Image (spheres, rainbow, N blue to C red):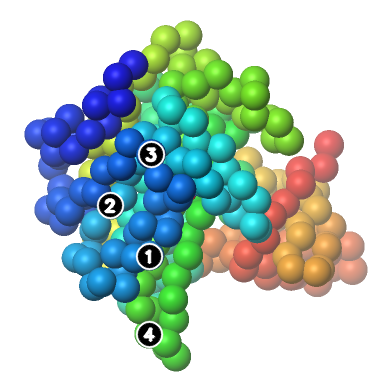
Amino acid sequence: MPESDIAPSSILGRLTTEFIGRNLLYYPTIPSTMERAKKAAKESAPEGTVVIAAEQTAGRGRLGRAWLSPSGSISLSLLLYPDWRHLPRLNMMASLAVAHSLEKVCGLETEIKWPNDVLIRGKKVCGILIESALRGHSVDWAIIGIGINANLDVSSISGVAATSLSGELGHTVPRSEVLQCLLGELERLYQALRRGEPLHQEWQSRLITLGRTVQAKSGDSIQEGYAEAVDEDGALLLRLPDGSLSKIAAGEVTLQP
Ligand code: BTN
């Protein structure tokens, strides 16, 4: 598939958004779209600026891990200037936007694993990384990085159970259509967030993490308990063996059999 299928000329034509993706920076290859988006933030680029790369050579994942994004993947970073109250909810917004887009464009059923992995049939198809800069109670900028295994063979990705859109469907997907839909969904949900509409009910209904015993790792702390629910900001509410409820805002979970 030619890389030009995700160049701005392929995306902007049928983009329905007002501001997300209207300033679109495209790179055939780049170390990481996160770094480029951070530079854009420091230069006060407009809200909604999107950096897209056909290939990343030093893609970053959560918790200091590397993220592989060879040619055929979808790698983007979105720059926002949100109100500080909305910052914790960007995570729900981004994973819901990905889930909606993969369902609409590819007809694939998705699940979300807390805090923000998007899975198909239990295997990871998308990772999300959110970085921000704060000054007291105000947010200087927030960047949502989204990596989707689109048209690629994931057998080379070790360490996690991974899948790709092409692997699931048995054919390649039109990445420009996935991107157009994704940018539209991100804008729609961001507007909903700004109007104060809650996202956690729909998000919670899609989480495969709930209703099971999990091990949650947050910083140096490891807790095992029953994943009961999430709060309005998407924090995980874990019922511990002593009956108390622990609220986990960030980290990762291992689903226990
Ligand atoms: C994870 O660990 O699950 C998060 C992966 C996030 C990867 C995306 S790809 C686009 C953006 N640029 C990066 O370097 N990382 C994020």
Say left or right for 257 vs 7.
right
Task: Estimate the spatial distance between the alpha carbons at disc 4 and disc 1, rounded to whole Å.
Answer: 17 Å
x and y percentages locating residue 128 in the rendered image = 50, 49
Task: Please identify, in this view, whether the residue under mark 4 or under mark 2 is nearer the observer.
Answer: 2
Task: Estimate the spatial distance between the alpha carbons at disc 3 and disc 4, rounded to whole Å.
Answer: 33 Å
- Residue 91 badge: none
Q: Quadrant of the N terminus?
A: top left
- Name the foreground residue: 239 vs 124: 124
Callout 2 crowding tier (Cα within 10 Å): few <14, some 14–19, many ≥20: many
Say left or right for 195 vs 32.
left
Say left or right for 187 vs 201.
left
Task: Please identify, in this view, whether the residue under mark 3 or under mark 4 is nearer the observer.
Answer: 3
Q: Is residue 135 above or below residue 188?
A: below
For disc 2, the marked residue is 50
Residue 73 falls in image quadrant: top left
Q: Amino acid at mark 3?
A: Thr
x and y percentages locating residue 113 in the rendered image = 61, 44
- Label 3 beta carbon within 8 A of ligand 1: no
Residue at left 39%, top 30%? Answer: 102
Task: Estimate the spatial distance between the alpha carbons at disc 2 and disc 1, rounded to whole Å.
Answer: 11 Å
Task: Please identify, in this view, whether the residue under mark 3 or under mark 2 is nearer the observer.
Answer: 3
- Residue 138 badge: 4
Residue at left 63%, top 64%? Answer: 250
- Residue 29 badge: 3
- Mark 3 or 2, nearer chain start: 3
x and y percentages locating residue 139 in the rendered image = 38, 79
For disc 1, the marked residue is 38
Q: Amino acid at mark 4?
A: Ser
- Mark 3 or 4, nearer chain start: 3
Q: Is residue 30 visible?
A: yes
